[in-house]
Image (cartoon, grey):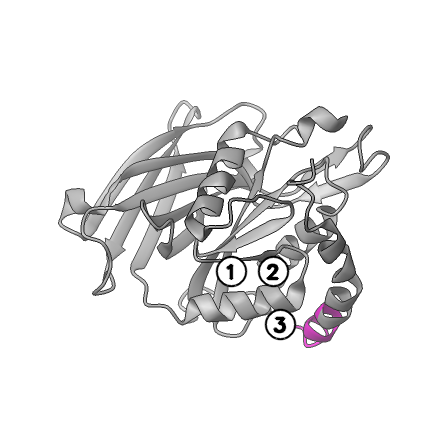
Amino acid sequence: MNEMTSVRTAAIAVLLFSACAWALVTATGTRAPQPGSGRTPVLVELFTSEGCSSCPPADDLLRRLLQDQPIEGVEVIAISEHVDYWNRLGWTDPFSSSRYSDRQSQFADAFGAGQIYTPQLVIDGRLQVVGSDWPAVRRAVLDAARSPRASVAVSAARSPDNRRAVVRVAVQDLPARAPKSALHVMVAIVEDQLITEVRRGENARRRLQHDAVARGLASIGSVGEADREGEFAGDIALQKEWVPGRLRVVAFLQDESTRRVVGAASASLK
């Protein structure tokens, strides 16, 4: 487990400073951006686990980023991806999946780090920071927001039998240097307001709350299939235990080779 916890000391060290810095930001009473606000969408992916004692502060920070949207000029679009490699240490995270562990490993390869840890926040597939370090998160998000990006719009609706989410994604205005055939149209179903009473492991006897938890993640096409721009559609299966009023859909364009994200959007699942 040394590889998985190599940054734990650093994560803990930034918690008090991050909390103070966040208090200064939230004291301004920033409101979440409204549609058409002109904010730049930036995708943040948090790799986390209920079995990791350093992760709850990062989960809380992600929730505040979504609710308060405190970074001027930026719309934070978030996905919380629970990895499964902590499960063997006493607590099985009910939201974990090997697919998110694999996705984190792909980012590690792309970054040339060869090492994974929690809590890790990946911003637009191009930058990574400790997920609880608010000053570092803010800097990375602002840096990512300066990069050219495509215009992405997404809508979603439940099928008549309530078993599937029917998702439509529109892509326009790709950056001039965007790849011509390696941009995947990715869609995630995320759920908010999830609460767990942890009974074992490092977070035993803690009550944890999560937002934007990945429930499903899939590719519904490649931009090259639509002459670099166009509309895409796909279905994602819905499970009975997912609460309809808490579900949202996140769509983003990701370079298959570099893992970088060049556009993102989110919408409620009606």
Height in image: 71 above or below 51?
below
Residue 82 in the image: state x and y as whole percent.
60, 37
Mark 2 near mark 3, Cβ–Cβ under 8 Å?
no
Q: Is residue 150 magenta?
A: no
Q: Residue at x 54, y 23 (%)?
A: 240
Secondary structure mostly seen in the magenta stretch: helix
Q: The residue tagged with tag 2: helix, strand or loop?
A: helix
**Amino acid type, mark 2:** Leu
Q: Residues within 10 Å of mark 2 (few under 14, many from 20)?
A: many
Q: Earlier in the sequence, mark 1 or mark 2?
A: 2
Q: Residue at x 68, y 57 (%)?
A: 132
Residue denoted by label 2: 65
Q: Could you tell me how far apart the alpha carbons at marks 2 and 3 are, in whole angstroms?
A: 11 Å
Residue denoted by label 3: 30
Q: Residues within 10 Å of mark 3 (few under 14, many from 20)?
A: some
Q: Is residue 5 left or right of residue 39?
A: right
